[in-house]
Image (tube, helix red, strand yellow):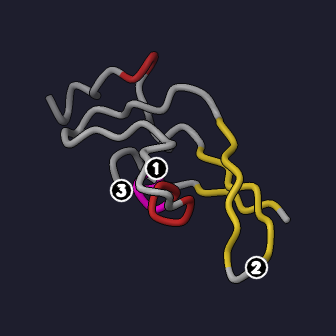
Amino acid sequence: RNILFFGETGVGKSSVINMLVGENTDAARVSSGTQGCTFASASYEATISGEQFVLWDTVGLNEGEKGKTPSSVA
């Protein structure tokens, strides 16, 4: 099964994936600022309630070119 995570930049998509993957590891890169840090889709395998899933982390919606913070936020 595949689960696709999408949404605005900085809302926590990668953090949710890390929580679901577990194993005390940061599988997906995260940042504490307003800049996005996911520049390409990536997949991570997770076992949830005994079932295998592929979690897809995507680039944030409205993300500027190459992860630059939009001028309206800077």
| Above or below, comparing residue 57 to residue 66 in the picture | below
Residue 66 quadrant = top left
Residue 50 quadrant = bottom right
Q: Quadrant of the C terminus?
A: top left
51 or 71, nearer to the observer: 51
| Above or below, comparing residue 9 to residue 73 in the picture | below
* 60 left or right of 12 in image: right
Front: mark 2 or 3: 2
The three-letter amino acid code for the residue at tag 1 is Ser
The three-letter amino acid code for the residue at tag 2 is Gly
Let me know if residue 42 is in the magenta part.
Answer: no
* Residue corresponding to mark 3: 11
| Residue 32 x/y as whole percent | 20, 43
Q: CA distance from mark 3 to mark 1?
A: 9 Å
How many residues crowd mark 3 within 10 Å: few (<14), some (14–19), many (20+)? few
Checking the image for residue 50, the label placed there is 2
Checking the image for residue 28, the label placed there is none
The three-letter amino acid code for the residue at tag 3 is Val
| Above or below, comparing residue 49 to residue 58 in the picture | below
x 33%, y 20%: residue = 68
Task: Assign a secondary structure to mark 2.
Answer: loop
x 60%, y 57%: residue = 5
Q: Residue furthest top?
A: 66
Magenta segment, which residues? 12-16
Q: Quadrant of the N terminus?
A: bottom right
| Residue 10 x/y as whole percent | 33, 48
Q: Residue furthest bottom?
A: 49
* Residue corresponding to mark 1: 14
* 2 left or right of 66 in image: right
